[in-house]
Image: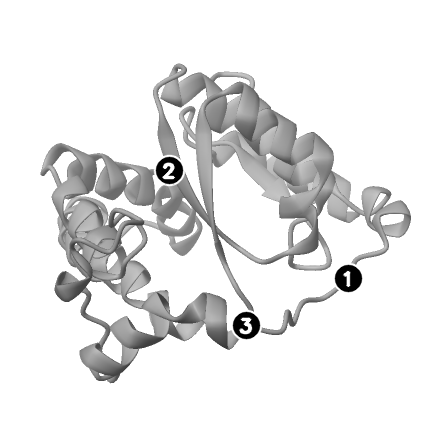
């Protein structure tokens, strides 16, 4: 059975609220980013001002993507090369409580389907992930995200009036604040990124949209 046939069979188990993208090279490119913006992000934010954090990746900076951000009142915060470690707590703020909820949902689901075939359990796991995310959202966990953006200096006023609230684990706050305030004199950081051959990658992307959504 070919990969395409397997994907068509597997899609029957997708949650109707989930959109799945496949990319054999394991990273996004311009095509997948544009589709994500047009079909998922922009409809959700409904023209509300939005702050979006992205890594310093080539396709994130193309004219088409930047124009989409501008047209939809999306302000982007680019994480420069070698600075990812500074904002890693953003993942922790979301992943830790989400995984706790996912564990609860899995335990509940396992109690219900105990004794069922393994194939049924694996298929049901997709629904479990969606249910856990809904609980995460309903528990107002966005407060954690807002706090993370604040203490990591992503959403602080550019004036520096609240720089004293910056807190990055493992880095002396005074050293970090002084570095941020003097960045213009110190010069910019070198960019380390992987340049993509978009012509090649566009032909290797499979995009699957769940038509039930």
Q: Which label's residue is closer to the chain start, 3 or 2?
A: 2
Secondary structure under the numbered disc 2 in the rendered image: strand
Which of marks 1 and 3 precedes in the sequence? 3
Nearest the viewer among 64 and 121 is: 64
On residue 164, which mark appears? none
The structure residue drawn at horizontal position 23% and vertical position 46%, both measured from the top left corner, is 113
Q: Is residue 210 visible?
A: no
Q: Which residue is mark 1?
A: 195
Vertical comparison of 44 with 77: above or below: above
Mark 2 Cα-neighbour bin, 10 Å: few <14, some 14–19, many ≥20? some
3 and 2 marks in contact (CB < 8 Å): no
Q: Earlier in the sequence, mark 2 or mark 1?
A: 2
Mark 3 or 2: in front is: 3
Q: Position of residue 202 (x, y in %)?
A: 82, 42
Q: CA distance from mark 3 to mark 1?
A: 23 Å
Q: Give the tally of numbered discs.
A: 3
Measuring 38% from the left and 71% from the top, which residue is drawn there? 182
Q: Are marks 3 and 1 in contact (CB under 8 Å)?
A: no
Residue plotted at (62% across, 46% down): 60
| Residue 3, horizontal then vertical, whole percent | 75, 48
According to the picture, the residue beneath numbered tag 2 turns out to be 51
Is 60 in front, or is 182? Answer: 182
Residue 94 shown left or right of residue 29 in the figure? left
Q: Of tags 2 and 1, which is closer to the observer?
A: 2
Residue 192 falls in which quadrant of the image? bottom right
Q: Is 96 displayed left or right of 178 in the figure?
A: left
Q: Position of residue 90 (x, y in %)?
A: 30, 59
Residue at mark 3:
187
Q: Residues within 10 Å of mark 3 (few under 14, many from 20)?
A: few
Name the residue furthest front.
Answer: 185
């Amino acid at each position: 059975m070919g990969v395409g046939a397997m994907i068509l069979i597997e899609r029957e188990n997708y949650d109707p609220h989930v959109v799945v993208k496949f990319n054999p090279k394991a990273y996004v490119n311009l095509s997948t980013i544009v589709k994500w913006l047009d079909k998922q992000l922009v409809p959700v934010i409904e023209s509300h001002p939005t702050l979006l954090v992205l890594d310093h990746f080539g396709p994130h900076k193309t004219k088409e993507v930047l124009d989409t951000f501008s047209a939809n009142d999306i302000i982007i915060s680019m994480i420069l090369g070698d600075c990812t470690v500074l904002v890693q707590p953003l993942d922790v703020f979301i992943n830790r409580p989400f995984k706790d909820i996912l564990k609860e949902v899995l335990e509940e689901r396992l109690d219900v389907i105990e004794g069922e075939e393994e194939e049924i359990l694996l298929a049901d796991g997709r629904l479990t992930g969606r249910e856990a995310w809904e609980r995460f959202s309903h528990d107002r966990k966005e407060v954690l995200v807002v706090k993370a953006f604040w203490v990591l200096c992503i959403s602080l006023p550019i004036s520096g009036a609240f720089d004293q609230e910056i807190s990055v684990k493992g880095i002396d706050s005074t050293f970090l604040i002084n570095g941020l305030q003097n960045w213009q004199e110190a010069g910019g950081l070198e960019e380390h990124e992987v340049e993509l051959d978009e012509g090649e990658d566009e032909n290797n992307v499979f995009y699957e949209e769940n038509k039930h959504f």
